[in-house]
């Protein structure tokens, strides 16, 4: 006797229901989408009994008697007719499975009436079997009532979560449908209490009705939807609503693009409110990666990321400028700064540690300090950290030492010739030199003091902004952007003057990368080396970082390098490297700073004299005391 049997339809429907009806919320999603497909302009949903009893009423096209009997059959659909239609979908549904599945695991009543028929029809089902039919008088549209969901599938019933969880899921599903279908009026009742009500009168009313006045007030329209400002920060990513071609979806790429666009503004662990309606040619997107059609994959994830990032960044930046009607924005003064780093600055940059070997890649010596014994001092200091130093010292350094000796020799000959005279003049020169040096240092210090005397750092706001007062105004600095700008200028300076120094890592860093990242590494080895990252391919998907630039990494080297890889695409790779490194390693919004740290930041910024972030966003908002007085009606 054969063992294989074709399953009874009622059994196969229950199996299919396992996929379609994960929980009451996913069932409600199917029902709503049916109503939307039927052109319903009003959808009312009543939920009771943990989501096991649901009634949905719509004002859609309705069904004739025959269709009413058919709609609960498996693979019964009015939405596609042949294979070709599958690839040209304009409806939410097409599988013809939802009603059959839901019906098979519940007791269901459907009544419906089309505009053209005089009366309506009603059928009752029990576990998928029609138990009753009658003609009824009713309004145009469809009403579906589900009772005792999962009554014949005890295992699934056990998976039902507690009421608050199921209701929260349902609310979220309805909200997501309502947020996109802004011409449809939705209402949702949970145990008799109306928790969602939209009027179907446009996106802004819908945002207002779903999220409240505060959200609407703090959101701004842009080319792809709405973005919320910093008054709407949330502690998770659930408030980033993304729709692709009209379907609510989850996409890591879109989410990342949104977060990237906000990056300088976000406090650690906080996420924005955003609604993104992204449309793309259907052949460039696969919505069926996940059975619940929620996770979406794009053929070209990178260009989707770029498109959204660009649009949103542009919008946020535009808004930054607009919002400063009261507070004026300090423009880039472009103060010319000398092109060289001081020894002091260099000293600060180079902080040798025991497991790091210092190697100078470019000539270390700059300016008039060339022949000063500071060089020797440095070498001695560095060699204390590593005996290897001598061995790897590049040849550029050596001629200078020889030169130094030659000059000494020359002056010895001179000395012999004009001993007396020379002795005196040398003495005088020494004194003069000492004096000028002293006065230069003094001048620098004086300049700093003078700069500092123009303002006072008051404190930190929200662990995000630095408050500063001057004689005329209150200034608000964005700490992340300030630090980013400083790092950016310093990096740019060292790079363009070919003064990036490398620290060789005694223990190289092994990084596992994906195929895309490996390609980026391969194509940019020279660029990385230019910036002090000595990278080599280790095996298939791993690289070794043997050397890194001397730089104050506030996040890990791995993190910085990965971030750099992500952001390298497009034009001007050098600028990208500099921006990525400074952005990633800058003080973040949300970090508490001491007054001293803030003072250093503000002074550094004024010394650089550039008051926008590398992306062009402003760093300072200002309000004069005059303006303030006016606002308080003091004048
Ligand atoms: P699908 O949506 O994939 O077609 P369903 O099982 O969800 O499959 O629905 C089957 C059919 O029942 C639909 O194709 C549609 O013709 C009809 N239908 C379902 N719900 C409604 C409704 N609310 N209004 C009008 N027709 C409906
Ligand atoms: Mg359907």
Image (cartoon, grey):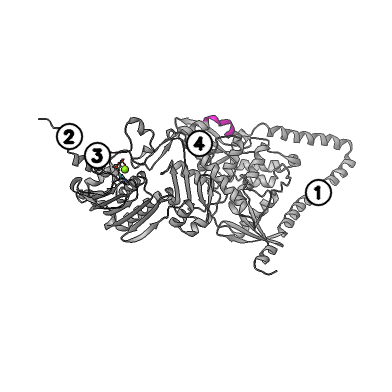
Residue 525 magenta-highlighted: yes
Q: How far apart are marks 1 and 3 (CA)?
A: 94 Å
On the image, which quarter does residue 628 sit in?
bottom right
Residue holding disc 2? 6
Distance of label 3 from label 2 (alpha carbons):
15 Å
> Which mark, residue 74?
3
Label 1's element? helix
Counting residues from the N terminus, which is met first, the one under dot 1 or under dot 4?
A: 4
Which-is-in-front pick, marks 1 and 4? 4
What segment is highlighted magenta in the picture? 522-528
Give residue 447's mark: none
Q: Residue 436 carries which label?
A: 1
Residue 303 marker: 4
Mark 2 and mark 4 lie on one chain; the one further toward the N terminus is: 2
**3D distance between C-alphas at marks 2 and 1:** 100 Å
- Residue 186, how many percent across, how many down? 38, 53
Q: In which quarter of the image is the C terminus?
A: bottom right
Q: Which residue does the image show at 82% across and 34% down from the upper left?
A: 410
> Image height check: is 493 above or below 82?
below
Task: Give residue 599's quadrant in the image.
Answer: bottom right
**Looking at the image, do the residues carrying marks 2 and 4 touch, with CB atoms under 8 Å apart?**
no
**Is there CB contact under 8 Å for labels 3 and 4?**
no
Residue 30: x and y in percent read 32, 46
CA–CA distance in space, label 3 to label 4: 40 Å
């Amino acid at each position: 006797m054969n063992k294989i049997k074709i399953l009874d339809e009622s059994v196969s429907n229950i199996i299919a229901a396992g996929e379609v009806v994960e929980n009451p919320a996913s069932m409600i999603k199917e029902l709503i989408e049916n109503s939307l497909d039927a052109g319903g302009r009003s959808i009312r949903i009543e939920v009771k009994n943990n989501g096991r009893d649901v009634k949905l009423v719509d004002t859609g096209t309705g069904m004739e008697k025959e269709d009413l009997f058919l709609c609960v059959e498996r693979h019964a659909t009015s939405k596609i007719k042949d294979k070709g239609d599958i690839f040209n979908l304009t409806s939410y549904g097409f599988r013809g499975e939802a009603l059959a599945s839901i019906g098979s695991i519940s007791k269901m009543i459907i009544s419906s009436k089309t505009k053209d028929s005089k009366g309506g029809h009603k059928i009752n089902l029990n576990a998928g079997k029609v138990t009753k039919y009658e003609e009824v008088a009713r309004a145009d549209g469809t009403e579906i009532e589900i009772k005792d969901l999962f009554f014949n599938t005890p295992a699934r019933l056990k998976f039902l979560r507690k009421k608050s969880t199921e209701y929260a899921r349902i609310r979220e599903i309805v909200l997501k449908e309502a947020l996109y279908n802004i011409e449809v009026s939705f209402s949702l009742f949970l145990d008799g209490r109306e928790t969602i009500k939209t009027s179907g009168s446009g996106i802004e009313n819908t945002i207002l009705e779903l999220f409240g006045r505060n959200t609407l007030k703090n959101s701004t329209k842009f080319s792809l939807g709405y973005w919320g400002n910093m008054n709407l920060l949330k502690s998770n990513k659930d408030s980033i609503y993304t729709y692709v071609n009209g379907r609510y979806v989850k996409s890591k790429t879109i989410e990342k693009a949104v977060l990237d666009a906000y990056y300088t503004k976000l406090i650690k662990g906080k996420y924005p409110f955003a609604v993104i309606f992204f449309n793309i040619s259907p052949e460039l997107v696969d919505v069926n990666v996940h059975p619940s059609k929620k996770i979406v994959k794009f053929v070209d994830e990178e260009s989707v990321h770029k498109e959204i990032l660009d649009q949103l960044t542009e919008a946020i930046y535009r808004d930054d400028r607009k919002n400063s009607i009261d507070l004026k924005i300090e423009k880039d003064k472009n103060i010319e700064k000398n092109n060289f780093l001081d020894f002091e600055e260099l000293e600060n940059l180079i902080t040798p540690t025991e497991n790091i070997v210092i190697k100078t890649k470019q000539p270390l010596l700059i300016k008039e300090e060339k022949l000063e014994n500071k060089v020797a001092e440095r070498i001695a200091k560095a060699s204390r950290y590593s005996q290897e130093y001598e061995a790897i010292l590049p040849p550029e350094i050596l001629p200078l030492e020889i030169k130094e000796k030659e000059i000494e020799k020359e002056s010895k000959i001179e000395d012999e010739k004009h001993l007396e005279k020379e002795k005196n003049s040398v003495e005088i020169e020494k004194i003069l030199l000492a004096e000028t040096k002293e006065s230069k240092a003094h001048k620098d210090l004086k300049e700093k003091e003078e700069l500092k005397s123009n303002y006072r750092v008051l404190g930190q706001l929200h662990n995000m902004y630095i408050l500063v007062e001057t004689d005329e105004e209150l200034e608000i600095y964005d700490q992340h952007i300030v630090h980013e700008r400083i790092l950016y200028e310093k990096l740019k300076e060292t790079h363009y003057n070919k003064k990036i120094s490398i620290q060789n890592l005694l223990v190289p860093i092994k990084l596992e990368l994906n195929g895309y990242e490996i390609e980026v590494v391969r194509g940019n080895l020279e660029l990385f080396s230019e910036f002090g990252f000595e990278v080599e391919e280790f095996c298939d998907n791993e690289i070794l970082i043997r050397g890194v630039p001397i730089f104050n990494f506030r996040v890990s080297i791995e993190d910085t390098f990965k971030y750099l890889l992500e952001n390298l695409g497009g034009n001007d790779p050098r600028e990208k490297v500099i921006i990525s490194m400074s952005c990633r390693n800058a003080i973040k919004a949300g970090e508490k700073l001491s007054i001293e740290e803030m003072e250093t930041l503000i002074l550094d910024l004024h010394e650089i004299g550039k008051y926008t972030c590398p992306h062009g966003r402003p760093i300072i908002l200002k309000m004069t005391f005059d303006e303030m007085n006016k606002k308080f009606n003091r004048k």
